[in-house]
Amino acid sequence: MLAYHYILSGQVQGVGFRPYVYRLANQHQLTGWVKNTLGQVEIRVQGNSEQLQSFNLQLIEKSPPLAQPTILSYHSCPLEKLTEFNILTSEVNAESQIHVPPDYFTCDQCLSELHNPQDRRYHYPFINCTQCGPRYTLIQRLPYDRPNTSMANFPLCNNCLTEYLQPTDRRFHAQPLACPDCGPQLTFRTNTQQINDTQQAISACIQAVKNGKIIAIKGIGGYHLICAADNDTAILRLRAKKPRPAKPLAIMLAEIVLTNDAMVHQLLHTPERPIVLINKQYLPYLSSQISPGLNEIGVMLPYSPLHHLLLTGLGKPIVATSANLSGEPVLTENQAVEQYLSHVADGFLHHNRPIIRPADDSVFKIIAQQPRPIRLGRGHAPLELSLPFRLSQPTLAIGAFLKNTIALAWQDRIVISPHIGDLGSVRSLDVFTQVINDLQQLYHIQAKQIVCDAHPNYSHTHWAKRTGLPVKSVYHHYAHASAIAGEFPQTGAWLIFTWDGVGFGANGQLWGGETLYGQPGQWQRIAHLRPFRLPGGDKASRELWRSALAVCWEIGLDYQIDGIAEIDLLKQAWLHQLNSPLTTSIGRLFDAMAALSGVLTVASFEGQGAMLLEALCLKDYHDFIALPLYKNTAWETDWSPLIEIMLSNQMNHAEKATFFHNTLAHAILQQVLQISQEKSIGQIGLSGGVFQNRYLTEYVINLLTKHHFNVYLPQKMPCNDAAISFGQIIEMGNLCID
């Protein structure tokens, strides 16, 4: 007889791992125990050598599908007087290796029961088991046990308790376990009625959507605003009321999307069930108002039992957009959603299971034959990564002002929060501080220092300075570069194109079209776009005509815009450099080209002009112009030859858009070829929101690969500002500025 003690880490809580170990030990007639500690699982097994060898071989190999266990230690130990194998009460120890499980989609077995009239959970919208259901959004604290979740106030009925205690049942120790007799319930509310019966509430919601209504429904990590996806009138009302006049809306479909792209199909069906951007041609029956002017649409499959019931009852796709005011975090509380969105929604489908923390839907896009995250949320965040170094003390990185995420790092670990959003409102800042406090409490880690963006006027930077902790700053584009270098810790110097909207640069200007050389902590600005002054500053991100004026005035060209009365006044301010900051922003150059070419002059959301230009690109049109490249203190690409081309009548909108993209791709190649004559380039990185543009990014990768350069694009983190918090930690781990 022998005895062994295991400590396992990784994704081992919230995935049915203890019940699995219990069954495996009994299968091999072993005695001992298994228990949760803070983020880990401990196992003690006793038996003969043959039994223990079989147990050891199968422990990892046959673990539950959602588990990702890692054996931290495994050693023999003294025998004890044990007669059976048990699941012991969880313990909290001082040395935590916490790994928080994400929220999961509804598994096939639960779906089968959901639609089986003979099952006691028939049409129950909170059905789950050890292999599916919410985790991250309902965990109050770890260890992951029912009293530590938002299910603590729902005592198990006798039937559920029997399942919970039965080792052979797949709901053995399923912490969110519930049924119609003991679990959460739905309520449907409008101005004229309140329905407290769960089944009647679902029916009333379905009927309201069929009647063209907009309904706010409470899901796993927050509320969605839903309406029929083929109803132009309902969608236009939703756009007007939210308001969201043109930004694309996400769609939820019950059936498999008909697409020839195997990667899209696979991504849609992953357990995380993200929103995936696909070509609109596969969904011709949807309203044209869902993504006007674009050729892609964001699609997801139902991931909760409630979604399955709604889509089955409707028999058609629904719009499912985050229930929030535009730019703010998703709403999670019953009263708050009615307070904020009573002018938008015609009704509310609530439930009484608290959402402990918000989690918006994740968004992915296939670029260069790989799924690339655009937004990390439900199912994918918090994202845990390993650092290429060890920190001397726990550090909090508070990310960018737009598309904000925060990162908590300690030792060689980093946890990046789900998408928070833009920090331009009081409520956004409240959620920002809530997420910071929550992550520290959840992981039992207290930050000892903070790293922030170098921009001196951001509200969350002021928040950091009020904490009393040491605060260090990192330049925005250094963080972009360090994010991709941190994801791919290669040897050799990087050449990284950090192309985005704007960020505060090391020379005090607004950067956005920079090429950086070196390694984290040692970045050198080696190239950039020709700078120009933005009349009105930040207003240019929505009023694209301002960028058009800026580039024309920069080259001495007068440009007239009908209906804009203040042009003469603006030019005087521009000439005197008043409220006209200098920028190298490629994002603002996209805006200028959208306006000059006649595609868009005023945007309802940041990046709209660039998205419309991308959507117009022609696959078989290869014309471009070689832009001048000059050497000043750094190499400078001059965009001026593009201006008259965009203003001419020699091309249509699609040809102009494609010509612009092709020219930018060749400008990148030209920079690389020039710099490679002066510097040794180990690899090339593409970082910044511009590289969400599939046409441009794939064109650039193709050009550079043909010239035998190794090109990297983020895979785990978004290339946009959501990666800034991660990049701040990577940069700070090597070098910070005071």
Image (cartoon, rainbow, N blue to C red):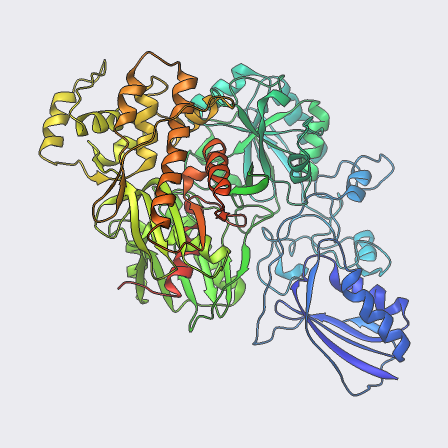
Q: Quadrant of the C terminus?
A: bottom left
Q: Position of residue 42 (x, y in %)?
A: 71, 73
Q: Nearer the viewer, residue 335 or 14?
A: 14
User: In this image, 87 relative to 552: left or right?
Assistant: right
User: In this image, 308 relative to 364: left or right?
Assistant: right
The structure residue drawn at horizontal position 31% and vertical position 20%, both measured from the top left corner, is 646
> In the rendered image of this protein, does residue 266 appear above or below residue 47?
above
Q: Quadrant of the N terminus?
A: bottom right
Q: Position of residue 503 (x, y in %)?
A: 30, 45
Q: Nearer the viewer, residue 186 or 285?
A: 285
Q: Position of residue 376 (x, y in %)?
A: 53, 46
Image quadrant of residue 584? Answer: top left
Q: Position of residue 709 (x, y in %)?
A: 48, 47
Q: Which residue is farthest top?
A: 649
> In the rendered image of this protein, does residue 573 appear above or below residue 49?
above
Image quadrant of residue 195? Answer: top right
- The answer to whether residue 197 of the structure is visible from this angle is no
Image quadrant of residue 287? Answer: top right
- The answer to whether residue 7 of the structure is visible from this angle is yes
